[in-house]
């Protein structure tokens, strides 16, 4: 985490071009479409699918770090109607 409490994701090994290529490949493989003829929903789903593995990796690393430090957790439940 950064000093402001924000998660710092590891840089993509291939940079922004790698993100673009991943999204284009997912559009092609999952929807049989290119960027120019994909719907906003398909673009969203392809972008989400490209981002998910990176988020999961960071989440698992954080979880393992907390477990090894025997960190305590606070759970907050709010029931507002």
Image (cartoon, rainbow, N blue to C red):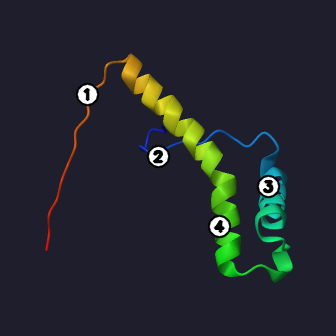
Q: Are marks 3 and 1 in contact (CB under 8 Å)?
A: no
Report crowding for label 4: few under 14, some 14 to 19, many 20 or more residues within 10 A (C-alpha). some
Q: Who comes first in sequence, dot 4 or dot 1?
A: 4
- Is 52 rendered above or below residue 74? below
Q: Quadrant of residue 39?
A: bottom right
Image quadrant where one finds the C terminus = bottom left
Mark 4–mark 2 distance (CA, rounded to whole Å):
24 Å
Q: CA distance from mark 2 to mark 3?
A: 25 Å
Crowd tier of the residue under label 2, counting other residues whose Cα lies within 10 Å: few below 14, some 14–19, many 20 or above: few
Question: Which residue, given by chain and number where applicable, does mark 4 sit on?
Answer: 45
Is 70 located above or below residue 17 in the figure?
above
Q: Earlier in the sequence, mark 2 or mark 1?
A: 2
Q: Is residue 73 left or right of residue 35?
A: left
Q: Closer to the N terminus: mark 3 or mark 1?
A: 3
**Residue 67 spot, x, y in % from top left:** 38, 22
Q: Residue at x 50, y 38 (%)?
A: 59
- The quadrant in which residue 20 appears is bottom right
């Amino acid at each position: 985490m950064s000093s402001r409490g924000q998660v710092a994701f590891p840089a993509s090994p291939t940079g922004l071009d790698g993100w673009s290529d991943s999204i284009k490949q997912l559009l092609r493989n999952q929807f049989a479409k290119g960027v120019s003829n994909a719907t906003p929903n398909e673009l969203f789903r392809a972008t989400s699918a490209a981002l998910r593995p990176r988020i999961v990796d960071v989440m698992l690393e954080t979880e393992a770090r907390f477990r090894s430090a025997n960190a305590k957790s606070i759970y907050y439940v709010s029931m507002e109607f």
